[in-house]
Amino acid sequence: MLQNERSFDELFCDVIESKDFSIFYNAEFAEDPVFNHVVLSSRILDIDLDEVSIERILNKIQAESEKLGVPSSIFADPIRKSAAKLERAAVDFGYRVGEKMDVMSKAVSDKIVVSSRRVKVVETKDIQQWNKTFIDSFAIPPSWEEELLKRENSFLNDPQIKLLVAIEEEGRAEKELASGCLLLHINPPSCAGIYCVGTVPDRRSKGIASSLMSKAESMADGNRCKLLTLQTIKSDGVTPMYLKMGYKVEFERDILQQV
């Protein structure tokens, strides 16, 4: 699951690696705490760190983030041995829990989500269409569009990545105007990550998201994946929707942000 997430992050971010941590960053999305974040190495998180070591690491993270000109948040995963101690130290260092993220999973063999018969979901190579739907669904600022298109074009022909759009059979002013989008990312081969699930505001509560999820799960099954994974931001309030679809919360992650 975490490998899938990290490889997805690399699609939209550059990465600086050190022995203690990795910084995922994109200055074009500097205000976003998910695109710009730090992941501590398992070597660090799986040992009992002392306070001096934690302070040293936090100082290095802060210095590297300042060089990049982005306010890097820190992902604190409670499944790691030193996560709680690191989080307490980060709070003393000036970080606060800005968001909480649910990391979720579902076995591919479980029942596939039922889709709406009024919605057609297709894989697309039309980056402009997918990107517009993504931007509209999440109210993304227009200033992001150029960078998003550049990133999306770079992985357009990657067989591990599937871009899906939902087209309603009726109900739109333009027949082929997409109502929703989803990105399916397969890495490693046994794991399919579901990302960027969005519905344009005026088409919500019409079965768009469930139709996208149904198609994504069917494609994961067709690619012989064993596990589905996704992440939700707690404040978005969408975790209950995925629980109804058969997903379970593996753990809740704190996103520590500098204040």
Image (cartoon, helix red, strand yellow):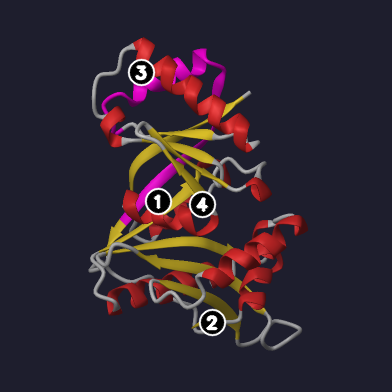
Q: To which residue does mark 2 refer?
A: 124
The percent position of residue 232, horizontal first and vertical second, equals 48, 49
Identity of the amino acid at label 2? Answer: Thr
| Secondary structure under the numbered disc 3 in the rendered image | helix
Label 1 packing within 10 angstroms: few (<14), some (14-19), many (20+): few
- Pick whichever, 175 or 111, lies toward us: 175
Identity of the amino acid at label 4? Answer: Val
| Secondary structure under the numbered disc 2 in the rendered image | loop
- Do the CB atoms of the residues marked 4 and 3 lie less than 8 Å apart? no
Q: To which residue does mark 3 refer?
A: 85
Residue visible at 51% across and 39% down in the picture: 37
| Horizontal relation, residue 166 to residue 86: left or right | right
Label 3 packing within 10 angstroms: few (<14), some (14-19), many (20+): some
**Looking at the image, is 200 positioned above or below residue 249?**
below
| Secondary structure under the numbered disc 4 in the rendered image | loop
How much space separates mark 1 and mark 2, taking CA atoms?
24 Å
Give the residues in magenta. 79-105
Residue 251 within the magenta-colored segment of the rendering = no
Residue 104 within the magenta-colored segment of the rendering = yes
How much space separates mark 3 and mark 2, taking CA atoms?
45 Å
Closer to the chain start, of discs 3 and 2, is: 3
| Secondary structure under the numbered disc 1 in the rendered image | helix
- Do the CB atoms of the residues marked 1 and 4 lie less than 8 Å apart? no
The percent position of residue 199, horizontal first and vertical second, equals 61, 66
How much space separates mark 2 and mark 4, taking CA atoms?
25 Å
Identity of the amino acid at label 1? Answer: Arg
- Pick whichever, 1 or 68, lies toward us: 68
